[in-house]
Image: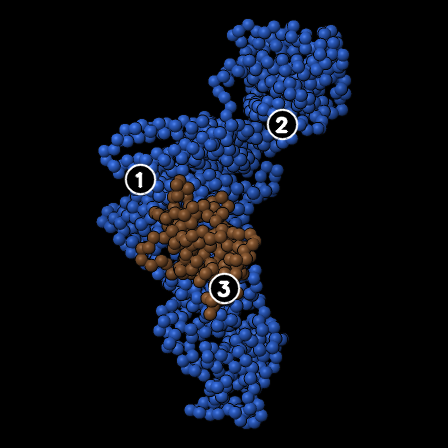
Chain colours: A blue, B brown
Amino acid sequence: MDDLLREFLTETNESLDVVDVELVKFEQEPNNATILDNIFRLVHTIKGTCGFLGLPRLEALAHAAETLMGKFRDGAPVTQAAVSLILSSIDRIKGILAELEEAEGEEPTGSDDDLIKQLEYMSEHAFDDAQGGGAAAAEAEDAPATGATASHDADAAAIKPLDQSLERELRPGEVSLDELERAFQETAIEIELPEPKPEPEPKATDVASISEGGKSEDAHHEKAPGDKKSSVSNQSIRVNVETLEHLMTMVSELVLTRNQLLEIVRRHEDSEFKVPLQRLSNVTAELQEGVMKTRMQPIGHAWQKLPRVVRDLSQELDKPIELEMIGADTELDRQVLELIKDPLTHMVRNSADHGLEGPEARKAAGKPEQGTITLAAYHEGGHIIIEVKDDGKGLDVDAIKAKAIKSGLHTEADLEKMTDAQIHRMIFAAGFSTAAKVTSVSGRGVGMDVVRNNIELIGGSVDLKSVPGKGTSFIIKIPLTLAIVSTLIVESSGDRFAIPQLSVVELVRVQNNSEHRIERIKDTPVLRLRNKLLPLLHLSSLLGMETVANADEALDQDNGFIVVMQVGSQTFGVVVDGVFHTEEIVVKPMSTMLRNIAMFSGNTILGDGSVIMIIDPNGIASAMASHASSALAEQDEEEHDERKKFVDHHATTSMLLFRAGSAEPKAVPLSLVTRLEEFQVSEIERSNGRDLVQYRGALMPLVYIEPSHAHRTEGTQPMLVFSDSGRSMGLVVDEIVDIVEDKLNIEVGSDQPGILGSAVIKEKATEIIDLGHYLPMAFEDWFVRKEMASEALTKSLLFVDDSAFFRNMLTPVLKAAGYDVTVCDSARAAVQVLQSGRKFDVVVSDIEMPEVNGFEFCEALRRDPRFRSIPVLALSSLVTPASIERGRQAGFDDYVAKFDRPGLIAALKDVLTNETRAAA
Amino acid sequence: MRDDRNQKAAAGTASGSGNEAIQYVTVVIGGQLFGLKISQVHDVFVPESVTRVPLAQPEVQGVLNLRGRIVTAINMRRRLSLPPLEGGQTMMAVGIEYKSESYGLVIDTVGEVLTLAANSREPNPTNLDQRWAEISAGVHRLDGQLMVILDVERLLGAMMSEPIAA
């Protein structure tokens, strides 16, 4: 029963799809008897099977629909309302089937009386005025439908006394014997069975005498068309898709093995294996082709639902729409077919909804009232092109622009620079819908981005062309099959990579003296190709395999190949060192560990047994795009620079408040202070023109905030002790006021040495001390100590912090540790500096920064092959396990608290020594 | 002095190993003895023609073909922040399966199979290098040396980074 049911479900679903299409056709050509016969037969079969399998609900519904169609066949006028009604019955049947499948054979409970009543009513009044059809259907709700059924059945009963042997009234789904017989005869004639048709009468009588008569009759009834079917279907069998998939995998493996064998034989010239291997190779190729064929289906299968979709939309939107389909027999892999079904449907809906204008607007534009959506499919060099075209108004560039600005995707300035084509493409961005209002059809903001993602998922691409007033056309390019990919094997810095042919447009050989050579515009390599400038990228630098300098060198040599690639509408050249050959490969997924590398889509085993990485063209395209957009970021940076100088720093900081010299409070971050001490003034000694105290067995120089200020002569002298690497300095203050926790927000900068600026602390303007000014006063070489410099000064360090305070405070500390420090006040500026080609051994970045925070900054660095190997340290006032974990995920090598200076220096040493070790 | 203590303790555990015994495959990485649970080790092989994977984490040495399967090779020396093996010595690899994917841990040499009592395992010393502690499931004291238990789950689990949204 289970098998039977499954068979039934597949078959019925297929039949229903056909019915859908046929009905739409029929509506347009109501006089075409062949179509009607076809529909009638299909519905009839469904009804019959349902009866046989004991599915009364489906049976009743199918029966009612069939009755109405029977009236059409008898010559009743075909109305739109009637067709709509039948279509909705078909939909209901589909719904029930779906539930049936889920419940594994249990027919869902529920009633279809509403539809059945309408269908019956419409059947009754089929010969009435056609115009009244719609209204009549509505009235049907009130009409005494049961009565109608009863009378119908009663008629049948009166004519054929045999029915009385059932000893009950016929259920709505059941047919009386005379109808059955009539159907038999008709069917028999229609199908023109070669053998003499079976005599139905005696069997029918037998069956009728048992109580389950109704159903069995139908089953029997079903037999006639079934016989005919088997004569055709003898030539084809249903094969489980899984079986095919498995077969495909095995063939793929076979292809790989064959390739390996061929490679071995190639190395041994006069091998006796040569001839049999050649044969094996041919057979394998044929087998591969054969198995591929089993998976191929005409694209028309994916289009099957579309006429119905368009018809419904046409009514819903009140726009006459014609759907034209070209190349429906173009074949492609069923896996691909399944995957593009939904995107295609969505695009057609989109075209109908906001591609095409309403009839009035069309008339006004001088176009025929009926809009046309054209679907076309054709082969083009190993892949399939599907075009969805409408002759509507085209994309509204201004609306897209407005939306882009509103959603913050781009600024107006960016948009000014973009071409129309670039703006059009924005509709593929996530959450982008230009539909003015949300209709039930589209405009919900999930749309073209999902379409694009789905298509890219199967290695395809989508692009669009739009001409104002003429229409829009979407061009989808998809591979024939997903299982085997034809790739180009290239070499870059000694490693081989496979580039899918799908995205390769052409190969250009470049040499210094040839007509094609690499030129540059401000360090950006380009190629002049047929009067167009092609942006170039070196594959090795994309993959971070060479330092920037080497890549430039390689480019300078300017000998190599450029693989011209097209992804979507983006065309660019990838420079490689060598091109070998093309090879059919079976894509194997990468291990989870490597899956986050966007540049690769998978890996495979080549003929020679080695593993090769498969380049993901989409990954390269987005790397290319981010390359371009970083240039835009530079400009922004300059504009914001001034404003950003003193940005809010939201994290609170522990500050030590003290008074020294003047009456205004001064402050220094508590974490910088090693200790608070008080000395007897008498302990202060003067030597070599400086004040010193003996502190922990060593002399500690004292520094006064304001040297001119009168010193105390007796009592105790408070001071702040700062220690670093065994040296200490005492900063003499008048009075230690308080320790407060507050936001450190330097609002007014200062020109006065020793003062960073003023901030509001405890609601009072407070001067923030610049320690970097005082430390050298104690030890002139505080920041340039020779023993460190010799080794560490070779290390260049990029320090990113938005707060001027920390920049000023930590820069000296870092310099003191012997680093060559470059300071940036934002992640953007840092990226700019990095992009400019300067090399850094290590990057230290703040986390809490406006616009681009440290996590994002680090992620960006990790994504860019040129910078991903630079160690990056996070510096934050916020140190929690969660933030450390977040930092680790973002790719930071270490995470240090902002005021933990020894920690920072230690961490720097750590990452740098690791780095040299790893490099060694 | 420390060694003496170790030996004594090792002897003690050997005689009193009444409880559950675990078999370990020992490997040497940078002179240090490590142990992997034998149930986790699928095979031992010499990693040949390893294909580099650019942009991968530095610990990933590359991918290689092991009898038709693609194996991701992880350089344990790099993972443990050890300098690379000197001058052309052949490395070995231990094949393991993690979440139905094949990985190869590239190590210096493979030792023997040891059967050790589970209760003689000691927790990581608190001052163990962070990078080591992350992947160590404890320490066994053997005659004259210590064996660090390599926790494969943690080693590989930590390397599975969430894909960064582009």
**Could you say whether the residue bearing mark 3 is in a helix, strand or loop?**
helix
Closer to the camera, B163 or A512?
B163
Number of other residues with Cα within 10 Å of mark 2, as a class: few under 14, some 14 to 19, many 20 or more? many
Q: Is residue A340 visible?
A: yes
- Inspect the image, locate mark 3, and give the three-letter code of the amino acid beneath it: Lys
Image coords of residue A392 (percent x, y): 51, 35
Q: Is residue A887 visible?
A: no
- Quadrant of the frame with the C terminus of chain A: bottom left
**Could you say whether the residue bearing mark 2 is in a helix, strand or loop?**
helix
Residue B59 in the image: above or below residue A283: below
- Inspect the image, locate mark 2, and give the three-letter code of the amino acid beneath it: Leu
What subunit carries mark 1?
A: A
Select label 3 or label 1 by which is in front.
Answer: 3
Work out whether mark 2 precedes mark 1 in sequence or the reverse, and give the earlier one: 2
C-alpha span from label 2 to label 1: 51 Å
- Inspect the image, locate mark 1, and give the three-letter code of the amino acid beneath it: His
Q: Which residue is mark 3?
A: B8
Residue drawn at x 48%, y 55% as measured from the top left: B150
Residue drawn at x 56%, y 65% as measured from the top left: A878
Image coords of residue A57 (percent x, y): 68, 23
Residues tagged 3 and 2 counted as in contact (Cβ below 8 A)? no
Q: Which residue is mark 1?
A: A581
What subunit carries mark 3?
A: B
